[in-house]
Amino acid sequence: MLERFWECVGLNTLWVLGCLPVLTAGSSTVALFEVVGQRRRGEYRPIARAYWAGFRRAPLARAGITLVILLALLGAVQTLTTGMALRDATLAVVFQAAGLLGLLAVGGAVVTALPLRAQPEGRSLLASLRIAGAAGLGRPMTTVAALMLTVAVVVGVVLVPPLLLVLGWVWATLVTSLSASVLEGRQKVKSAGRRRSTW
């Protein structure tokens, strides 16, 4: 148990350090999910080596995607705050609704796509987003749960900053479990469709 705790603290520390330059946050977060996924599958490699192997993969592509996601989130936040400042009630509602939907769409897609991206199949980010989008439409409550979990972790870290040393690992583990349940449900639907087509 104590060994697992120190692994958790070590992985979180690497993740936080990897996120500090901002543009490397994508690589760092995918590496976090890769290590968590390996542990879930029973693959045990030294934490630092496993993290570094995931971190250094496709750095430019991940930096570009990180920038796009940050800009999309900032755009959604700006739309929401603009809506709150408008005096026209109709326009205010439209802007606020657009901002909230944008935050939910971008946040939900990213959170549900991260565990898919970190799986050993080596899906591209676009493929992961496509699968996450389809799964999100089919299982919206799972996406909402992952998003609420992410918000809770962010709030927890803001209120108690030292929690960052463990909450990243907890967040990645729980989101990976949610993603696995979505994928299992998707596979069952596909299998049922194939059985019907053979009849």
Image (tube, grey):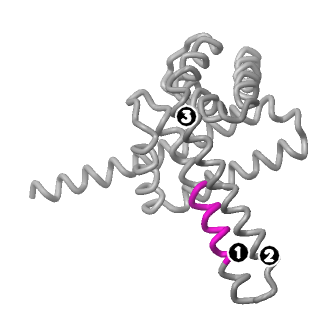
Q: Position of residue 76 (x, y in %)?
A: 67, 62
First of labels 2, 1 by sequence position: 2
Identify the residue under disc 1.
96
Q: Nearer the viewer, residue 160 or 27?
A: 27
User: Do residues under tags 3 and 2 come within 8 Å of each other at their CB atoms?
Assistant: no
Which residue type carries mark 3?
Answer: Arg
The local secondary structure at tag 1 comes to: helix
Q: CA distance from mark 3 to mark 2?
A: 33 Å
Identify the residue under disc 3.
62
Task: Give the magenta-colored segment's residue range.
Answer: 95-106
The local secondary structure at tag 2 comes to: helix
Q: CA distance from mark 1 to mark 3?
A: 30 Å
Above or below: residue 138 compared with residue 146: below
Numbered badge on residue 46? none
Left-right relation of 22 to 159: left
Q: Name the residue at the left extreme.
A: 199
Q: Position of residue 65 (x, y in %)?
A: 55, 41
Question: Which corner quadrant holds the C terminus?
Answer: bottom left
Is residue 104 covered in magenta? yes
* Quarter holding residue 128: top left
Identify the residue under disc 2.
84
Per the picture, the main secondary structure of the magenta-coloured stretch is: helix
Residue lying at 73% horizontally and 26% vertically, measured from the top left: 12
User: Do residues under tags 2 and 1 come within 8 Å of each other at their CB atoms?
Assistant: yes
Above or below: residue 35 compared with residue 116: above
Which residue type carries mark 2?
Answer: Met
Q: How many C-alpha atoms fall within 10 Å of the one at disc 2: few (<14), some, or many (≥20)?
A: some
Left-right relation of 136 to 106: left
Which residue type carries mark 1?
Answer: Gln
